[in-house]
Image: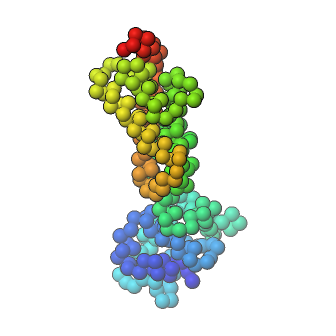
Amino acid sequence: MEPIYHLRELIPDPEALLALEPEELAGLLLQAFKMSGHKQFSRHNIMLSLTHGTPPPYQPPYASQIPTVIAEAWAWLERECLLITKPTDPHWQVLSRRAQRIATPAAFDVYRGASSFPRSLLHPRIEKEAWPSFSRGRFDTAIFEAFREVEIAVRDAAGFKQHDHGVPMVRRAFHKDTGPLTDRSVDDGEREATSALFAGAIGSYKNPNSHRHVGREDVAEAGELLVLASHLLRVIEQRDRRWPDNRLAALASAKDGK
C-alpha cells in the first residue's frame, strides 16, 4: 500500500491535516513510510496517488490542497537528512540511518525538539559535552554533563584543588567576603544571591543526576537547563577575567579573618 493511504489512517480528518505545520506532518509522513513496508519512495508517485489513487485518499475540495502540505513536510524531511536520495538510483529516495533509528512518535518528538533548539545559545563547552546526549534524548545525562562543566569551571577559576567539588566548593568560591569569584563591586545581597544561584544549580541539577535516574523527558525543560548552564559558565568567565585581583582580595580577607 502506498504511504499516503497509511497517512490517511494516521490522520483521517483532512482539515486537521491541513492545519499541521510541516515539521508536525513530517513525523506522521515518516510513520506512514515505515508502515508501508516500502524500502524506497518516489515523490512523483506519491503525489500522483493523491490525485489519481483508487480510491482517492482525500476527496475534493481537500484533494487539491493536500499535495502542497505533503510537499512541505517532504521538504522538511529532506532538510533534516531523514529522507535522502538513493545512492544507486537518483529517481528514488530512502530513509536515512537517522530516520531508521527514530522508532516511535515519541522519539520523533525528541528529535524534532532537538533539531529546532537554538544551539547558538549554548556555551561552546556545553555544546561539546552535552549536545550529543541531548540530541539523542538522553536528557538526564545531558543535564549532568552540562552542570559538571559548570562545577569544573568554578573549581578551575577559583584555583581550588581537584578533590574540591559540589555545593560546599561553590559556596566557598562565591562566598560574599572571601570567595575568589565573588563580585566585590556589588552589595552583600547580590553576592549572596549569586552564591545561592550557583549552589542551587549544582545541588538541584548536577548532584541528583550523579546519583540516580531523574527521568526528565521534556525536551524543552532539558534545553532550558542547558541554556542555564551556559549562562553560568559565561558568568564564571567574566569573573575569571578579573580573577587575579579577586583572588588576592579573597586571600587577604581570609588572612585577616573577615
Q: Is residue 114 visible?
A: no
75 relative to 94 in the view: left or right: left
197 relative to 136 in the view: left or right: left
- Quarter of the image where the C terminus is located: top left
Q: Nearer the viewer, residue 44 or 204?
A: 204
Residue 66 occupies quadrant: bottom left
Q: Measuring 48% from the left and 77% from the top, which residue is drawn there?
A: 7
Q: Measuring 39% from the left and 38% from the top, which residue is drawn there?
A: 200
Q: Is residue 81 visible?
A: yes
Q: Is residue 35 above or below residue 147?
A: below
Determine the residue located farthest toward the right in the rendered image.
88
Measured as percent of width and height from the top left, residue 31 is found at: 52, 72
Count of number-bearing discs? 0
Q: Measuring 39% from the left and 73% from the top, which residue is drawn there?
A: 17
Q: Is residue 194 above or below residue 208?
A: above
Residue 60 occupies quadrant: bottom left
- Quarter of the image where the N terminus is located: bottom right
Q: Is residue 116 above or below residue 158?
A: below
Measured as percent of width and height from the top left, residue 91 is found at: 63, 69
Q: Is residue 5 above or below residue 102?
A: below
Measured as percent of width and height from the top left, residue 228 is found at: 41, 41
Q: Measuring 48% from the left and 46% from the top, which residue is drawn there?
A: 208
Measured as percent of width and height from the top left, residue 146 is found at: 50, 41
Q: Nearer the viewer, residue 33 or 178?
A: 178
